[in-house]
Image (cartoon, helix red, strand yellow):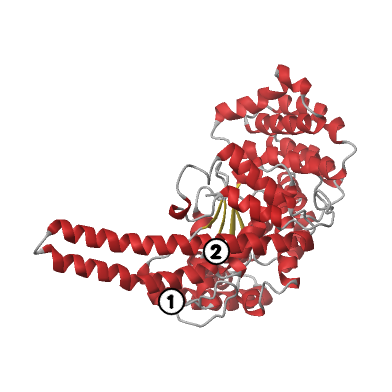
Amino acid sequence: MFIAICFIANSSLAAAQPLGTARLPTLGDDGEMSASAERRLGDDIARELYRDPDYIDDPQLLEYVGTIWQALLGAARSLGEISPELDEHFSFELFLEHDRTVNAFALPGGFMGVNLGLIGVVATPDELASVLAHELSHITQRHIARLIGRQAKTMPLMLGAMVLGILAASKNPQAAQALAVGGQALVVQNQLNFSRDMEREADRVGMGLMVPAGFSPRGFVDMFDKLQQANRINDNGSWPYLRNHPLTTQRIADMQARQPRDAVPPHAPGAFSLEAHGLLAARARVLAGPGVDALRQWEDAPADRSFATLAPAERAATLYAGVLAASQLNQPATARSLLARLRPLVAQDAAASRQVRLLAADVALRAGQPEAALPELLATGASQQRPELLLRAQALLALGRASEISGDLQSWVALHPHDAGVWQALASNLHAQGQVLRAVRAEGEARAAQYDYAGAVDRFKAGQALAAKSSTPADYVEVSIIDTRLRAMQLLLREQAAER
């Protein structure tokens, strides 16, 4: 399902979690998992997601989705949907998945996953915001905790059906099977009904976040229309009571009825215009492609006869996809040729022009021309943003000028201590300058940011050993930080082992 809770738990896990009492709105069912326990479960899942080959840290796409996500989080906080307890314990961290399916999923502890396939199919920022608002509402309404509580309550029904089946087996094997299957069906049906209520609640609460976050609630209806007409994800012929989501047509009608009368801008103003959205959607489609053949199709698309009939924004998106595909196919000359055709189409749109300059810098770096990347990055006017920062770090490292960006990288991780990608870039930067102790510490912080506590312990211990063997006085402050961080990671590792 494109709008779904990704629920990873089983009966033994649910039974093992610390119990708490959380009063939850609307559905009236008490959750049996505390916010801190749910976060610990989320951390375990997040660690595996970081190791998943489908995990992707694409700075441009992550910045785009993150901007929408942060706007929705701000609206949820202002409306009181995020309680102080959730704000303290939950992560509200985004993951991008290298997956072509049209999907986004909420995870325990406030984590959110977004597939590239979803970014590639939405036509406006409002449509993407509607999906994220829906999934955020699964998080704020504690639906995963409720599902775990519901699961714990229905286990006696399942066990009872199995016991009755065992007792009946000596007399009538067919009756025993019928009792067991019937009992399981009752449990499954109750769970499906419960999930449908959750989906309706997530639609309703998510709709309420759209206008305060600066998006048009029309995005909900447009997204459901897209699913119904193109993907047929919900309306597949099954009876409504056999689903865990309400019918798409039912949800469209509900969302249409909830549309506010006041006019709302067609998309949120700010850093991402509709033209920039089109370029980033094209980027997602290319990166989600299955292989070389798909890249060649994107590269050849601007030469197709139908290209001339496209609207300017569509031509820009097609050229952007062609440039990116040609670059990934190690054809820099073709990429530069398509770039020259792309630039005039976005010259009047600042947000789209920035995305094209970032693409041009990436093309130059892939072609082994870091000196050509730097002017593109300086011209974006956003040199301190994450995409520019990482590309500049890569270019300066290749030019042997790593020291020029050390301060910017250090400032970023001071403000964003959980950014594993920038920590790793800082580690490479420090290694190039011969600052090995600081580099090893940065590697440990990168592991910690990805919830790999064992890996972080290994790096911090390596830092201690390095300082002990050094013939020159080691940096006292750096050694003190490493010692403190090592103890913190060891504590987390012990807690993790105890829970298992």
Residue labelled with disc 2: 198
Left or right: residue 264 versus residue 15 is right
The percent coordinates of residue 278 (x first, y second) are 74, 39
Q: Looking at the image, is 411 positioned above or below residue 223?
A: below
Residue labelled with disc 1: 17
Quarter assignment of residue 99: top right
Q: CA distance from mark 2 to mark 1?
A: 22 Å
Task: Tell me how many marks there are.
Answer: 2
The percent coordinates of residue 36 (x first, y second) are 54, 77
Name the residue furthest right: 348
Q: Looking at the image, is 24 positioned above or below residue 344?
A: below
Residue 439 shows up from this direction: no
Instruction: Name the amino acid type tagged 2.
Output: Met
Q: Earlier in the sequence, mark 2 or mark 1?
A: 1
- What residue appears at the point 78 percent right and 63 percent down from the top-left corner? 212
The answer to which of 168 and 3 lies nearer the viewer is 168
